[in-house]
Amino acid sequence: MALLKDLFIGLSQNQILNSAAKKYGLKLGAQNVVAGTNVEETIQSIKELNAHGISCTVDNLGEFVFERVEATKAKEQILEVVEAIHTHEVDAHISLKPSQLGLDIDYDFCLENLREIVAKASNYDIFINFDMEDYNRLQSSFDLLETLSEEYSNIGTVIQAYFFRAEEDIQKYKNYRLRIVKGAYKESEEFAYQNKKDIDENYIKLIEWNLLNGKFTSIATHDHVVINHVKEFVKVNNISNDKFEFQMLYGFRTDMQLSLAKEGYNFCTYVPFGDDWYGYFMRRLAERPQNLNLVVKQVFTKKTNTIIGLSAAAFLLGRISKKK
């Protein structure tokens, strides 16, 4: 399983494959894992989900930006989505990555980009979630959150269960709306659990703690074992449905998404849009390789499977060569 996780992370960082995916994404079946390549298509996808009682969090795909012009473009795209959510009166909010908005360029530059987005969203009563990335960007992302929370209340963030510091972080930020995930990047054993069992146990521990003590908990998982555990936990502890929601990715376990919404649980679909989908999707598979089984039939064409297979082979050969 660890090798498979390394494989997907390696593929996510392959610039040649990322470029090819941008060019040929729709032909490869990307429309099944992204809600649209532009705002209009994405709003239509949101409306379809809303019709089933499902809310959405919208992610403008792209991260690790190192040019100001790219970060500014990303900011404008997100502002456009905020305006569209307001105009169309859809049930949706924004998830964004600080690295896409200039965190790796200049902290203050990123802060001002974020402030502009959060301010506009606040005027429309739209929530903004700060997605968390790798460990090197973790503390600076929390710093941005804390700074902006002095001015605005419509922001929250993500706690990644594989980090040793996650328990401390969840207690510190309990008064924020929090999404709890396992974690999708390859992290050093100095900072993060490496064993799946340890990560899973910490994940459940964090969910339970925040359900009992936090403001609001978004439980982001496709794992029916975890979902069933949460259902029983909230029942036993008399936790009302307005204190939490389940979250899944667009295109994953669609039947279960609809089922949970019909059962009366708050449900939110993570809706990515744009053409920079490849790295995002590979990390979702790295986070939980079992996800591949959930979407392979509905996402991949025969052509896609061939490309992924060749890419995987190339990656594995590269690892073997390095070891030699």
Image (cartoon, rainbow, N blue to C red):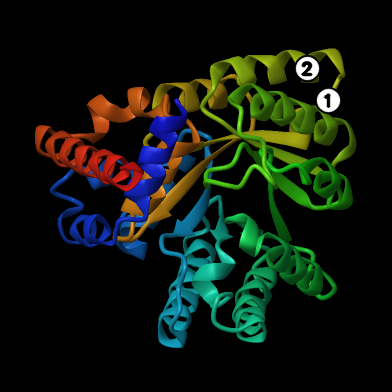
- Residue at the image point whose x is 59% and y is 42% from the top: 183
Residue 6 percent coordinates (x, y)? 42, 39
Q: Which residue is mark 1?
A: 239
Query: Disc 1 and disc 2: Cα gap in Å?
Result: 8 Å
**Which amino acid, by three-letter code, is at mark 1?**
Ile
Q: Secondary structure at mark 1?
A: loop
Residue 158 percent coordinates (x, y)? 67, 49
- Residue at the image point whose x is 67% and y is 42% from the top: 192
**Quadrant of the drawing holding the N terminus:** top left
* Left or right of 193, for residue 39: left
**Which amino acid, by three-letter code, is at mark 2?**
Phe
- Residue at the image point whose x is 17% and y is 34% from the top: 305
Residue nearer the viewer, 80 or 280: 280
Instruction: Give the mark, 1 or 2, whose residue is nearer the N terminus.
Output: 2
Q: Which residue is mark 2?
A: 233
> Which tag is nearer the camera, tag 1 or tag 2?
2
* Left or right of 37, for residue 53: right
Query: From this viewpoint, is residue 48 visible?
Result: no
**Quadrant of the drawing holding the C terminus:** top left
Labels 1 and 2 touching (C-beta < 8 A): yes
Location of residue 87 with respect to 265 vertically, above or below:
below
In the displayed orientation, state which residue is furthest to the left: 303
Residue 164 percent coordinates (x, y)? 75, 42
Identify the mark at residue 18; answer none if there is no mark: none
